[in-house]
Image: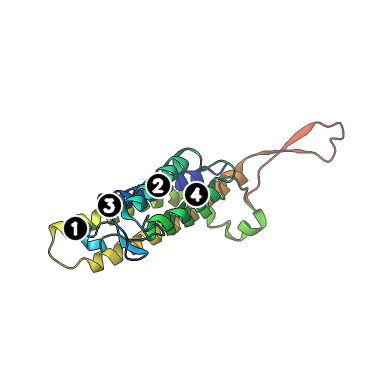
Amino acid sequence: MNQKTRIFASTFGAIIALAGLEHGIGEIFQGYGALEGNMILSWPNSEFFRSLGGEPAMTLIPNYLISGIATFLVSLTLLIWAIGFVHRKGGGWLMILLSVILLLVGGGIFPPVFGILIGVVATRINVEAASPKVSRLAGFRPLLAKLWPWSYTACILSWLLLIPGVPLIDRFTEGDVTTVILVILLLVFGTLFLTIVSGFAWDIQVQVSTPSITLDSDSRKGQPSAQKPSIV
């Protein structure tokens, strides 16, 4: 099992699910009202989410309350799955499916899209490294692997800077926070990409450094011989 890839998928899958829960709560608070279109705001009258445009979302359910309940339930399912079951067979694909459903019932725009990306990464949790493909990057792999704890921490902090960071900054300042949002979004995308790549590098490093038991060419008697690991 690719340990760092699993940690990444579980952590950020849970963050995505919590973001979906927040959208669902906002829609539930709007009550049993019919929608005027598929695009809605989860928190249209909230001063706290003013800087984020009231948290836009889309839904195929023509009712705020029902859409909010559906979003809440799908997000809760995604949260449980990300924390406890994403490493199982087909776990990444189910995360992708739940993220698509979350997008269609009112779970926001960015959270489900990120959820799909994280689900794609999660499909690699139980996949062994293909040595011919990674050999070209073998020289950079130790460095990337060492970066993983730092990029992982930086990515979590970037998400916290986005929510609740941006609304808090907007609440206590009177200036335009558009530039702040753009900078934080760049941090989120950059650290997310680096965490994915460095996580892969860490897992591959572990795989190629683990001794494997193979049959020696002279061991016709069926006795295995240990073969030293080689760094591809």
Q: Tags 3 and 1 in contact by the CB under 8 Å rule?
A: no
State yes or no: discs 1 and 2 in contact (Cβ < 8 Å). no
The residue to which callout 2 is attached is 75
Query: What is the tally of numbered marks visible in this picture?
Result: 4
Q: For the residues carrying marks 1 and 2, which lies nearer the camera in this image?
A: 2
User: Which residue type does callout 2 highlight?
Assistant: Ser
Say what secondary structure mark 2 lies in.
Answer: helix
Q: For the view shown, which residue lies furthest in the right direction? A: 220
Answer above or below: position of 196 versus 177. Answer: above
The colour style of the image is rainbow
Secondary structure beneath disc 1? helix
Report the Cα–Cα distance between label 1 and label 2: 27 Å
Tag in front: 1 or 4:
4
Kindly tell me whether residue 16 is visible in this rendering: yes
Please tell me how crowded label 1 is: few (under 14), some (14-19), or many (20+) other residues with Cα within 10 Å: some
Q: Name the residue nearer the viewer: 145 or 154.
A: 154
How far apart are the two marked residues, 4 and 2, measured between alpha carbons?
11 Å
Q: Residue at x 22, y 62 (%)?
A: 51
Checking the image for residue 26, the label placed there is 3
Element type at marker 3? helix
Q: Pointer 4: what residue?
A: 95
Label 3 vs 1, first from the N-terminus: 3
Amino acid at dot 1: Ile
Counting residues from the N terminus, which is met first, the one under dot 1 or under dot 4?
A: 4
Q: At which x and y percent is residue 62?
A: 37, 58
**Residue bearing mark 1:** 169
* Amino acid of disc 4: Met
3D distance between C-alphas at marks 3 and 1: 21 Å
Which badge, 4 or 2, is on the more N-terminal residue? 2
Q: Quadrant of the N terminus?
A: top right
Query: On the picture, is 110 further left or further right than 121?
Result: left
